[in-house]
Amino acid sequence: MQIHQSAEDYLETILILHERKGLVRSIDIANELGYTKASVSIAMKKLRESGYVKADAEGFLTLTAAGQEVADRVYTRHKLLTAFFVRLGVSEEVAAADACRIEHDISEETFQCLLAHARQNVDGQKKAE
């Protein structure tokens, strides 16, 4: 199933906020992303209907297995790309912003090559030490 960039951003944000705070509500997402509560509410409804998010009676959001899979994929890409750009000399802020844009469009093949390159460099550094 094709998932849009905005949905990936919401799922990634739920994952990040859950790691940071434990419990996540729509208002937390709105505050984190700078969106209106109404916009987030509409998006959460669509994500629930699509099977990516669940909400309990108190309004706390959790990712379903499908939502977790998407969020993990996007967040892994984000972290690797950010680290890669920082190692190239890009400032942390610019690197994170660029990674956020690229994480949605980079092909799986290119990402896997970047990942292999990163692992090779980490392994090479460990051997040199």
Image: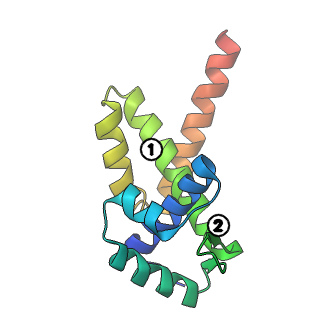
Quarter of the image with the C terminus in it: top right
Residue drawn at the location 65% of the way across and 11% of the way down: 128
Select label 2 or label 1 by which is in front. 2
Q: Quadrant of residue 95?
A: top left
Q: Amino acid at mark 1?
A: Leu
Image disc number at residue 97? none
Judging depth in this view, the residue of 67 and 58 nearest the camera is 58
Is residue 2 at all visible to an observer of this figure? no
Query: From mark 2 to mark 1, how far is it between C-alphas?
Result: 20 Å
Placement of 56 over or under 35, stated as above or below: below
The residue tagged 1 is: 81
Q: Amino acid at mark 2?
A: Gln
Disc with the residue nearer the chain's start (2 vs 1): 2
Quick one: label 2, few (<14), some, or many (20+) residues within 10 Å? some
**Labels 2 and 1 touching (C-beta < 8 A):** no
The residue tagged 2 is: 68
User: Position of 127 compared to 1: left or right?
Assistant: right
